[in-house]
Image (tube, rainbow, N blue to C red):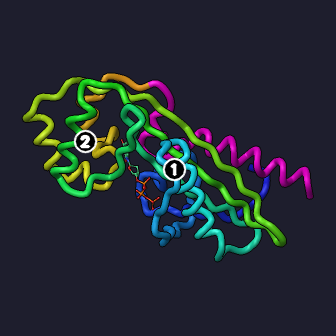
């Protein structure tokens, strides 16, 4: 990327930080403190709203020349949103619904480029289809009552033990883990090029 700028990741998710590190980007970490509120029940709209709230919240305190990235990931089954489980029983319920079926993972990303006078904002949604093998009662219970599901949308981590149950995916794997880094890089490059052209 041609210009030096400060990058802030408005996220407490260690996975998002690691995915950026994988492509050589070391962001400052400033998780947003907003109380997440949504006006929609459509997965694509929900992740856009939440990613925007997180990025805008953190962008308020930044100096010009900073880019803030906010992201939000949900799992959707037949259009119904599955967020993070609130308990192991809740994880068990979600995992029972997902086994033997296809579902979608949506990550919304909002990038705010902080300027002297105004901020520029770019948002997008990335979708990945995931097919899950049938799971036995014992497998669902063992996984649901492990620590892995608790901080993850849909109660699973494709990057962890749940890989044993993933038959296939269509789309970006990193999107399921919480950040479609390829698209983030491309969109950020485009954003900086546009700003360079306007200088
Ligand atoms: C489906 C799936 C989700 N996840 C994670 C990615 C996200 O961290 C989490 C969804 O929660 P989010 O609310 O998107 O993010 P977060 O609370 O972890 O972090 P922050 O709000 O501060 O940005 O689920 C996996 O790690 N693996 C998976 O396979």
Decide: few, some or many residues near mark 2? Use Cα within 10 Å; few <14, some 14-19, many ≥20: many
- Residue at image position (35%, 45%) is 82
Label number found at residue 94? 2
Residue at image coords 60%, 64% = 8
Q: Is residue 116 left or right of residue 5?
A: right
Residue at the left extreme, as displayed: 138
Relative to 156, 89 lies left or right = left
Q: In this image, 96 relative to 125: left or right? A: left
Say which label, 2 or 1, has the lower sequence index: 1
Q: Which residues are magenta?
A: 170-199
Please, what secondary structure does the residue beneath circle 2 have? helix
**Relative height, residue 50 to residue 96 (above, below):** below
Q: Residue 26's x, y, as percent?
A: 56, 59
Name which quarter of the figure residue 116 lies in.
Answer: bottom right
Look at 72% across and 74% down and name the residue there.
63
Residue 174 image offset from top left, x and y in percent: 47, 39
Check residue 192 for magenta coloring. yes
Above or below 113: residue 21:
above
Seen from the viewer's position, the closer of residues 18 and 40 is 40
What residue is disc 1 on?
Answer: 40
Q: Quadrant of the C terminus?
A: bottom right
> Which secondary structure lies at badge 1?
loop
Q: Does 28 appear in magenta?
A: no
């Amino acid at each position: 990327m041609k210009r030096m700028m400060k990058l802030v990741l408005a996220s407490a998710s260690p996975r998002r930080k690691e995915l950026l590190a994988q492509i050589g980007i070391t962001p400052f970490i400033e998780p947003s403190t907003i109380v997440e509120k949504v006006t929609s029940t459509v997965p694509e709209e929900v992740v856009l709203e939440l990613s925007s709230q997180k990025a805008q919240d953190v962008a308020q305190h930044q100096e010009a020349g900073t880019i803030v990235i906010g992201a939000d990931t949900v799992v959707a089954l037949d259009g119904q949103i599955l967020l993070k489980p609130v308990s192991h029983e809740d994880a068990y319920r979600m995992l029972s619904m997902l086994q033997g079926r296809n579902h979608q993972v949506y990550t919304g990303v909002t990038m705010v480029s902080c300027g002297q006078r105004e901020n520029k904002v770019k948002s997008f949604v990335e979708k990945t289809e995931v097919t899950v093998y049938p799971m036995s009662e014992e497998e669902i219970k063992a996984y649901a009552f492990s620590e892995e599901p608790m901080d993850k949308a849909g109660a699973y981590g494709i990057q962890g033990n749940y890989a044993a149950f993933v038959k296939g995916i269509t789309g970006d794997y990193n999107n399921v883990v919480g950040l479609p880094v390829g698209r983030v890089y491309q969109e950020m490059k485009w954003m900086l090029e546009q700003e360079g052209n306007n200088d």
